Image (cartoon, rainbow, N blue to C red):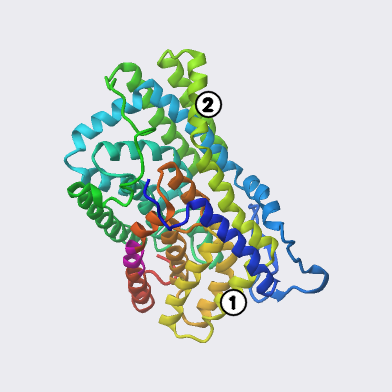
C-alpha cells in the first residue's frame, strides 16, 4: 500500500483523546446545574447556572487518566460494540448461505448500467429513516453488503459509504419527527411537537438533491477513471467478493424475506414500542439462526463462520470504544460545559440574522464534543432557546439551527463512534472520507445559512415561526 503522511483513524482518535486531557489543564473548569428530564435517563442544563469549579470540587486529571478512561469509553459504547460483533457474525452466516450474493448479483445485473437509480433510491430510503425515527445504528449491518455491491458495479467503498452516511446526516439535519433529535429540541423550546413538518419535508428533498448530486458526480468520475478513486490503493480483494454460486433458490429467497421482515419489524418496534439495540440484536440473531436452518448448514461450520465474521469486526469495534473515550475525558476533566458556555456567549448582543447563523456555528462546534443528537439537544437548547428570544429569532429557527449543526456534521466528526467504526468496516481511511465529504459540507452549510436567513425573514409565511 502506498505510504501516506495522513494519520490512521486510531492515531487520529488517540490524538483527540490526548488533546482533550491537555485542554483540561488549560481551560477553566465549570459546570451548569442540571435537572433530570421526566421519563428519561438524561439531564437538562438550567440556563444561567454556569459556574466555575474550584477548590475541593475541581478535578485535575492525573497524567495517566486518558489510559484509565479507555475502559470506561469501551463500557459506555458497549451497545454499539456488541452490535458490530454480533451483526458481523450474522452477516457472515448470510453470506455463507449464498442469499446475499444471489441478491447482489441480481441487483448488479439490473442496475450496473444505471448506478444513479441505486444511489437515488438508497439516498431516499436512508434519509427517510433518519428523518422519521432517527435511524443510524441500524445501517451498520448494511455496510459490507453495499460496499460489495458498489465494488461489483465498478464503483468504490466511498460511493457505498456516501449512499448511507450522506442521507443519514441530511435526514437528521432536516428531521421532522425524529424522536431523538427534533422532537426533543422542540419540546425544550416550548414548541408543538412535529410543528413545521411541511417545511422540513421540503428541506429534506432539497438537501437530499444536493447530496445525491455530490455522490453521483463522484461515482461517474471513478467509473470513467478508476485511478481517480480516493481509495484506489486500498485492497478490497478479501471480504467483499461475490461468490460464484449466485443461483436464486427458494431457500435463499426465504432468507432474504426474513432479513427484510426483521428490519421492518425493528423499524415498527422502534417507532411504536421503544425498541433499541437489544431488540435489534435479538432480531439479527434470529435472522442468523433462520439462515443456518434454511441453508441446512452444518452446525460446526456455522459456528466457525459466525466467529470468523465477528472477528473481522474487531478493528471497527475497538475504534468505536476509543472514539467514545474522547467525551469521557472531556467530562472527567470538567470542561465540556466550559466549552459550551464560551461559544454560546459569543452570540449575545448580535442581530437576528447573525444570531441565527451563529447558532448554527455553535451547534456545529458542539457536535464535535457531544456527537449524540439527544445529548446535544439537552445541553444546548436550554441555552439557545432563551437566547433566540433575546435576539428576536423564532424558536423554530433555533431548533433548525440545532438540527443543521448536529445532522450534517454527523457524517464526519471523529468523535462519532458510529462513523469511525463504519469507516473501518469499509476500509476507508478517515482522511480520505474527509476529502470526499468536505466539499459537500461546504455546499450543505451554504444552503443551510441561506435557509436560516430566509426562515428568520419569511418564517411566518412558511407557518414556521411557532406552530404549523
Q: Which of 270 and 213 is in front in this view?
A: 213
Residue, x 45% and y 71% (percent of image)? 360
Q: Which of marks 2 and 1 is nearer the N terminus?
A: 2
| 432 inside magenta stretch | no
Q: For numbered disc 1, what is the local secondary structure?
A: helix
Start-end of magenta stretch:
439-445
Quadrant the C terminus occupies: bottom left
Query: How far across and down, in percent of the image, does residue 178 sit?
Result: 46, 53
Give the left or right position of residue 110, taking residue 93 as reference.
left
- Above or below: residue 61 compared with residue 51: above
Mark nearest the camera among 2 and 1 is: 2
Evaluate whether residue 97 shows in this view.
yes
Residue 342: which disc?
1
Location of the N terminus by quadrant is top left
Placement of 381 over or under 86, stated as above or below: below
In the picture, the disc for residue 307 is 2
Q: Quadrant of residue 408?
A: bottom left
Amino acid at each position: 500500500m502506498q505510504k501516506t503522511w495522513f494519520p490512521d483513524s486510531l492515531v487520529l482518535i488517540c490524538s483527540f483523546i490526548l488533546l482533550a486531557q491537555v485542554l483540561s489543564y488549560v481551560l477553566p473548569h465549570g459546570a451548569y446545574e442540571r435537572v433530570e428530564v421526566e421519563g428519561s435517563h438524561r439531564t437538562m442544563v438550567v440556563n444561567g447556572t454556569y459556574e466555575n469549579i474550584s477548590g475541593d470540587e475541581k478535578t485535575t486529571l492525573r497524567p495517566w487518566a486518558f489510559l484509565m478512561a479507555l475502559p470506561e469509553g469501551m463500557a459506555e459504547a458497549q451497545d454499539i460494540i456488541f452490535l458490530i460483533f454480533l451483526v458481523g457474525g450474522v452477516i457472515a452466516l448470510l453470506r455463507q448461505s449464498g442469499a446475499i450474493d444471489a441478491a447482489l448479483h441480481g441487483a448488479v445485473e439490473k442496475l450496473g448500467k444505471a448506478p444513479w437509480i441505486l444511489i437515488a433510491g438508497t439516498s431516499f430510503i436512508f434519509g427517510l429513516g433518519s428523518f422519521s425515527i432517527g435511524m443510524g445504528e441500524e445501517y451498520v449491518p448494511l455496510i459490507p453488503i453495499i460496499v460489495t455491491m458498489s465494488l461489483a458495479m465498478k464503483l468504490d467503498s466511498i460511493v457505498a459509504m456516501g449512499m448511507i452516511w450522506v442521507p443519514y446526516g441530511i435526514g437528521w439535519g432536516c428531521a421532522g419527527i425524529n424522536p431523538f433529535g427534533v422532537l426533543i429540541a422542540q419540546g425544550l423550546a416550548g414548541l408543538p411537537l412535529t410543528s413545521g413538518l411541511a417545511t422540513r419535508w421540503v428541506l429534506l428533498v432539497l438537501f437530499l438533491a444536493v447530496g445525491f448530486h455530490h455522490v453521483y458526480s463522484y461515482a461517474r468520475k471513478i467509473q470513467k477513471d478508476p485511478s481517480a478513486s480516493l481509495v484506489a490503493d486500498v485492497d478490497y480483494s478479501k471480504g467483499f467478493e461475490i461468490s460464484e454460486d449466485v443461483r436464486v433458490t427458494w431457500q435463499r429467497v426465504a432468507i432474504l424475506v426474513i432479513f427484510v421482515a426483521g428490519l421492518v419489524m425493528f423499524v415498527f418496534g422502534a417507532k411504536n414500542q421503544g425498541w433499541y439495540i437489544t431488540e435489534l440484536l435479538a432480531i439479527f440473531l434470529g435472522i442468523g439462526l433462520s439462515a443456518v436452518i434454511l441453508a441446512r448448514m452444518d452446525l460446526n461450520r456455522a459456528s466457525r463462520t459466525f466467529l470468523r465474521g465477528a472477528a473481522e469486526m474487531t478493528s471497527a469495534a475497538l475504534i468505536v470504544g476509543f472514539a467514545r473515550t474522547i467525551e469521557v475525558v472531556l467530562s472527567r476533566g470538567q470542561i465540556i460545559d466550559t466549552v459550551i458556555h464560551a461559544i454560546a456567549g459569543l452570540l449575545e448582543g448580535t442581530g437576528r440574522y447573525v444570531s441565527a447563523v451563529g447558532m448554527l456555528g455553535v451547534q456545529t462546534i458542539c457536535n464535535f464534543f457531544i456527537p449524540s443528537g439527544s445529548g446535544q439537544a439537552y445541553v444546548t437548547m436550554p441555552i439557545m432557546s432563551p437566547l433566540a428570544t433575546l435576539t428576536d429569532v423564532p424558536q423554530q429557527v433555533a431548533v433548525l439551527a440545532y438540527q443543521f449543526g448536529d445532522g450534517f456534521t454527523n457524517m464526519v466528526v471523529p468523535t462519532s463512534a458510529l462513523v469511525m467504526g463504519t469507516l473501518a468496516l469499509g476500509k476507508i481511511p478517515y482522511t480520505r472520507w474527509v476529502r470526499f465529504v468536505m466539499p459537500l459540507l461546504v455546499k450543505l452549510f451554504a444552503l443551510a445559512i441561506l435557509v436560516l436567513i430566509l426562515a428568520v425573514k419569511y418564517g411566518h409565511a412558511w407557518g414556521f415561526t411557532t406552530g404549523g
